[in-house]
Amino acid sequence: MQYVSTRAASKADTQDFSAILLGGLAPDGGLYLPLTYPQVSDAELSAWRALSYADLAYEILRKFATDIPKAELKALTSKTYTAAVYRNVRDGERAAEITPVRVLEQDGDKSLLLQALSNGPTLAFKDMAMQLLGNLFEHALAKDGAHLNIFGATSGDTGSAAEYAMRGKQGIRVFMLSPHKKMSAFQTAQMFSLQDENIYNIAIKGVFDDCQDMVKAVSNDLPFKRTQKIGTVNSINWARVVAQVVYYFRGYLAATTANSQKVSFTVPSGNFGNICAGHIARMMGLPIDKLVAATNENDVLDEFFRTGVYRVRRSSETYHTSSPSMDISKASNFERFIYDLVGQDAARVRALFHQVETAGGFDLSGKPGSDGDEWTRVAQFGFQSGRSTHADRVATIRDVQDDYDIAIDPHTADGVFVARKFAQPGVPMIVLETALAAKFNETILEALGQDAARPAGFEDLESLPQKFTLMTTDVAQMKAYIAAHTGL
Ligand SMILES: *Cc1c(COP(=O)(O)O)cnc(C)c1O
């Protein structure tokens, strides 16, 4: 399997899976995608019904990671997807299923299902891919005794998922910037309580954008990046996307008994990484009817799917909401879908995303003066969308608790709220549960008047000793700190 950039000048310019594993953007500024999507046959899909999650992950990944020896890949998926790693599921006895699916609502032949993706160590769905990434990285580096220093910025979920995936891994260190005193007490404690020697938490006197600017400034110093072996694990990483494809297959197989049946998914969305994996599963032939993108008040994606206009937001138009992991100004994985939407025409993608940088967006509505009419093809890809507000989330958390005795988190509530509008008779609608309620207790308390239940082991999280370094936004000082701690 060969990979090509969404902005490639030539489709002969390809890379294999291992070559793009440790990188981020392609050198031309595009994102990597396979040259063609591998297809899943009816017989394969039937055989996969009996597989464990780990074995299913192996079957899907081996279609993409063709340059990793099969036995090694199988060892990596078996080590990653265990009940011990994904143990925080509400009904503890279902941990072996890794992403258990439960029926939430049944109304005649309309059904709403919830697929739990947040049973991993940091209680959010990012663990699904990041845990595999940690093992893939360690495996890749071990081959030649190499080192990797992951440098990133986080406002919460990504940073903690990366740290829990990389802690204690040979050859890997993590330097994670976060805005000082801007994360929730739970998120801060989750990251800062890690005492592992290879984890460096750096609290920056500033806001999240300051942290991100520092990551950019350091990454733009190419000689420094090279000598210090700096890498990233942000949401555009291809291996993260492909690891997420697995749970769409698992959800489909759990909700159906025959391959003639279809299901739909509603996905609480921000950077479009999660739902992009759903799109890929559908392109591989998984019988998905609709893929519904649910956004909060930061509705860049909802606006595109409703109107064909993609308009990135300025910081002053980007809101801090009660589903903070979806507070984005632009959707970093969206370019992957646009590539398919415009018929894999890389020159067109290059022009459109150049326009995003110079003019803040593009318009594919087909109206006079627009940049194209491909939006009319969106339905062929199954996409629909909706948005919710804080009041919608709070009301949804409340009535899911009242009706089904489950506390859902605010991101999942965005999903349930939107899914209810799009559920069709005869097609199970699966809402992806992207975090556990305990992680966003402030909103649970507001909605339910009581604290969210905490999974075992998290009871005293905030009282554990915390390890972090406080720094200013001085880039030179940051580089000196990194250099001093990588030992390179
Ligand atoms: C990251 C995140 C999202 C958004 O996922 P994308 O892949 O960025 O679309 C939604 N919910 C939670 C809880 C998250 O952590």
Image (cartoon, helix red, strand yellow):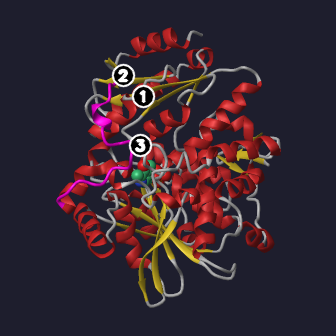
Tag on residue 328? none
Left or right of 66 on screen, residue 267:
left
Q: Which residue is mark 3?
A: 157
- State whether residue 179 is above or below residue 83: above
The answer to which image quadrant residue 176 occupies is top left
First reached walking from the N terminus: tag 2 or tag 1: 1
Q: At which x and y percent is residue 165?
A: 54, 36
Q: Which residue is mark 2?
A: 467
Res 119 visible: yes
In terms of depth relative to the viewer, which is nearer, 202 or 12?
202
In terms of depth relative to the viewer, which is nearer, 189 or 241?
189
Q: Amino acid at mark 3?
A: Asp
> Distance from label 2 to label 3 (Cα)?
18 Å
Magenta segment, principal secondary structure?
Answer: loop
First reached walking from the N terminus: tag 2 or tag 3: 3
Q: Amino acid at mark 1?
A: Leu
In which quadrant is the C terminus drawn? top right
- Circle count: 3
In this picture, which residue range is highlighted in magenta? 449-466
